[in-house]
Image (cartoon, grey):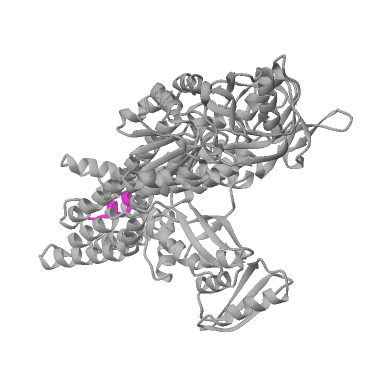
Amino acid sequence: MLGRLSLPVTGMTCASCAGRVERALRRVPGVVEARVNLASERAEATGTASLEALREAIARAGYGVAEAERDLAIGGMTCASCAGRVERALRRVPGVLDVSVNLASETAHLRLLAGTDTAPLAAAVARAGYSLRAEAGPDEAEAQRRRLRRERIELALAFALAAPFLIGMVGMAFGRHWMPPGWAQLLLAAPLQFGLGFRFYRAGWSALRARAGNMDLLVAIGTSAAFGLSLVLLLRGEPHLYFEASAVVIAFVLLGRHLEQRARRATGAAIAALLALRPRTARRLDAAGAEQEVPIAALRPGDRVVVRPGERLPVDGVVEEGASGVDESALTGESRAVEKHPGDAASTGTVALDGRLVLRATAVGAETRLAQVARLVQAAQASRAPVQKLVDRVSAVFVPVVLGVAALTFLGWWLAGGGVAAATLHAVAVLVIACPCALGLATPAAIMAGTGAAARAGILIRDAEALERAGAITLVAFDKTGTLTEGRPRLEGLHPAPGVERATALAAAARLQAGSEHPLARAVLEAAEGGAEGGEARPAEAFRALPGRGVEGVVEGARLLLGSGRLLAESGAAPGPLAAAADEAAARGCTLSWLIRAEPPAALALLAFADTPREGAAGAVAALAERGIATAMLSGDGPAAAHAVAERLGIAEVAAEVLPEQKAARVAAWQREGRRVAMVGDGVNDAAALATADLGIAMGSGTDAAIAAAHVTLLRPDPTLVPATLAITRATLAKIRQNLGWAFGFNTLGIPLAAFGLLSPALAGAAMAFSSVAVLSNALLLSRWRARA
């Protein structure tokens, strides 16, 4: 059957571009007709070719296909089979590139062609027997509260109707007959079966229409068999009835579903807590300086906003007036207040404690750091761990296999002379005990709880794959400057060569560094501006940066260089009489820079910079060593200076004089040795190394660049978060393994017990409900995790 696909094409600028895309599409096997509209920037292809083949053809022609991501809230899913069916239904919708359905959060994360309509997605979900729900918001929150109230009322009614059966079951254990009379049992069981239990028929019928199976189908078949058998026996006047097998099972299944929903809401609490940090209104200053209270949605970048003591900041911005301690704990996990003064940056959702601030907004709404963090946590919680593929394969065949086992159980007991009643009850027990819910919840519940706990500590984990990568790390490599040290070096010493004035050397270095934002440049400029020989430096002429080595320029007619020992060697100059001072400064861990005359080559001065190690650096290295994880340090400093800092922090392995572009090669070399490497850097000049490492950890600001380059982003520059990252990822992986072990073990043990008559349907229902709740409760233990100080 021929289909038509419409693809949004990027990169086209003229009619020849459109023609090239059109010709590329027509060459794809299976394409009958292709048309490209340059004005709408869309290509339409008719035929049987796959979407992936069309995308590849467009890419080979030199253009791209615009993509988008979308999250859908799915209603009606109850088990892993449901999640798999929704996923398969959405994958078949034209324009959908990839789908990941999360049973724990009841959401589907889609990667699709830009401009794909929601209507076909909703129709596909409906055909599979489910529904699209509204996204989280005030209306949906109120709807959730109404659903919760209704669930509680229905649960109370279910147990009120099932209570006489439970009392009768207790009496049976003591040899007493406390069961109600037969017709009373029917009157109690019928509302449970066909009223409160109607949801199982509805969902089971939807699954059958979609030629699939789910937990609802198993419950519907099992309880209907028990109810029908009991009704026949009642009409025959038999004394032994089994209405409790249907009534109690439905009550326990409803209890399990209710507890599951509560636990699911708890596992997703991290997102709700982050979004709750946003205030709803703000005080904006108008042109006359008067305060106006406006909705957050009305704010724009550049607006001036007033924040009073005790209020949350409504925007990301720069402080223009005032000073205050700011509580950033909810966003970064930092327990101590951070002082903010004019010129400092501040983030949405943090709290001004003791002063009034006036901010100039730099980002609002969806562009704020808080919104970025929420999106990252949401994406991580929606992601799928590689181990989930095994669960998906099992879930796809689980329900048909269980139905087969139940049929064999019935036949086995009937042929063995157990009678229809006994055979039916044991088959019902098999259907009820075989709950794939725990299997579907095992992985996503642990991921949601683990990533949520990490986010509260200031650790953003990009996806579930990063969790598995972190679990295998054997070596953590730290960049030195700005990661293990504060990144705010100061000029500790300036040693001029004989015949060179100190003031002249400092002024020349300042002119070479004028306008630069490099930390060493700022240290030189601060020393020059603060000293008696200083003043504001004029930029050098013919300035040129020498990446990874330093800078050069013309000062007072002479071409000068300023940079590392590597640059000194390349220039042909020698340390000369400054060698002893260089050795002594390097032994103290100082970073060395040389002021060099190009012609004739000569070292004019030595500049020694000191950078304070971060407060938690030594503790982080020690904590990693306790876990059996080796540490290494990458530095552009000379060997003596690098080893001095490493020795102070307890790091044994050092790679010194490493240029930024060489860091990735050094990481790759460690990997070739069979080591699994985590690279910790600032996420900007370490981007290549972060991407090369098995696990990239960007430490510091949590900017877009850092988030894009790393698998993990730390929201505050605290080295102790590195061992904490490995601790929470390993704890999460342990929970996943425990949950999967429990879910597989429960069914592996429970189904045979039920088949051999060792579990009654009522006990099977209780055990099934306990299975899902146990998995969710085990995952929720991660919510109590806290990073060690």
How many numbered tags mark residues here? Answer: 0
- Is 675 placed left or right of 749 in the picture? right
Q: Is residue 540 visible?
A: yes
The residue depicted at 52 percent of the width and 46 percent of the height is 709
In front here: 247 or 401?
A: 401
Q: Is residue 370 magenta?
A: no
Q: Quadrant of residue 567?
A: top right
Q: Residue 736, position in %: x, y?
A: 34, 45
Q: Quadrant of the C terminus?
A: top left
Q: Quadrant of residue 233?
A: bottom left
In front here: 488 or 7?
A: 488
Q: Quadrant of residue 497?
A: top right
The residue depicted at 22 percent of the width and 63 percent of the height is 405
Q: Residue furthest right?
A: 288
**Position of 504 relative to 154 (above/below):** above
Give the magenta range.
Answer: 241-249
In front here: 281 or 217?
A: 281
**Position of 574 relative to 548 (above/below):** above
- Is 356 placed left or right of 161 in the picture? right
The residue depicted at 50 percent of the width and 33 percent of the height is 456
**Position of 67 relative to 442 (above/below):** below
The residue depicted at 44 percent of the width and 34 percent of the height is 656
